[in-house]
Image: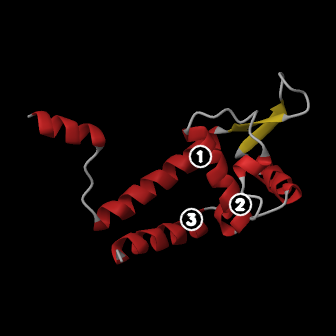
Amino acid sequence: MNSDLLCVLAEIHEWEIEHHVVFQTVLGRALYFGILHAHLNGHRLDHTSLKQLVNPDVATDRGVRLRMREFEKIGLIYVELNTIDKRTKRIVPTEKLIELMNAHASQFMRLFQKRFIVIKKDECGSRLRS
């Protein structure tokens, strides 16, 4: 068992809870990571169902919709009508959410680097060629 890795996970979890209300509930955390995953993988958030954003075992569709309204209220996303399919809505991450994602990633990297040596992919290739 790699206790250093588990320590990093525990420390990032503490940071999450201390730094944003989004992470203080299981559903908020699940929705954040669902939006994050879709955004980072280039998925458009206008054809993504609630079940794709949050595992149905975590919450009901109603619960996810309520949490999405909270995300919208605190300025993390805005929801607009989908121009292609009027039955669906498009979830748009705001600059505030992007900033939170960047802060989250930076904090994770800082905590990870305290316990591990990190070689970035592009650095690894250039070192091998030298």
Answer left or right for 44 relative to 118.
Answer: right
Picture quadrant where residue 116 is located:
bottom left
Outermost left residue: 130
Q: Could you tell me which residue is drawn at 79 percent across and 63 percent down? A: 59
The tag earlier along the polypeptide, 1 or 2, is: 2
Q: Which residue is mark 1?
A: 37
The tag earlier along the polypeptide, 2 or 3, is: 3
In this rendering, the answer to whether 80 lies above or below 105 is: above
Q: CA distance from mark 1 to mark 2?
A: 14 Å
User: Which amino acid type is marked by label 3?
Assistant: Glu
Foreground residue among 99 and 38: 38
Which quadrant, please, contains the C terminus?
A: top left
Q: Could you tell me which residue is drawn at 53 percent across and 72 percent down? A: 14
Q: Which residue is mark 2?
A: 28
In this rendering, the answer to whether 34 lies above or below 83 is: below
Q: Could you tell me which residue is drawn at 64 percent across and 64 percent down? A: 23
Density class for disc 3 (Cα within 10 Å; few <14, some 14-19, many ≥20) is: some
Which quadrant, please, contains the N terminus?
A: bottom left
On the image, the x and y values in percent for residue 39 come to 60, 39
Outermost right residue: 87
Foreground residue among 91 and 125: 125
User: Which amino acid type is marked by label 2?
Assistant: Gly
Q: Nearer the viewer, mark 1 or mark 2?
A: 1
Numbered circle sitting on residue 16: 3
Numbered circle sitting on residue 77: none
Query: Mark 3 and 1 residues: CB-CB less than 8 Å, in contact?
Result: no
Foreground residue among 121 and 16: 121
On the image, the x and y values in percent for residue 76 come to 70, 46
Query: Mark 1 and 2 residues: CB-CB less than 8 Å, in contact?
Result: no
Picture quadrant where residue 118 is located:
bottom left
Q: Nearer the viewer, mark 2 or mark 3?
A: 2
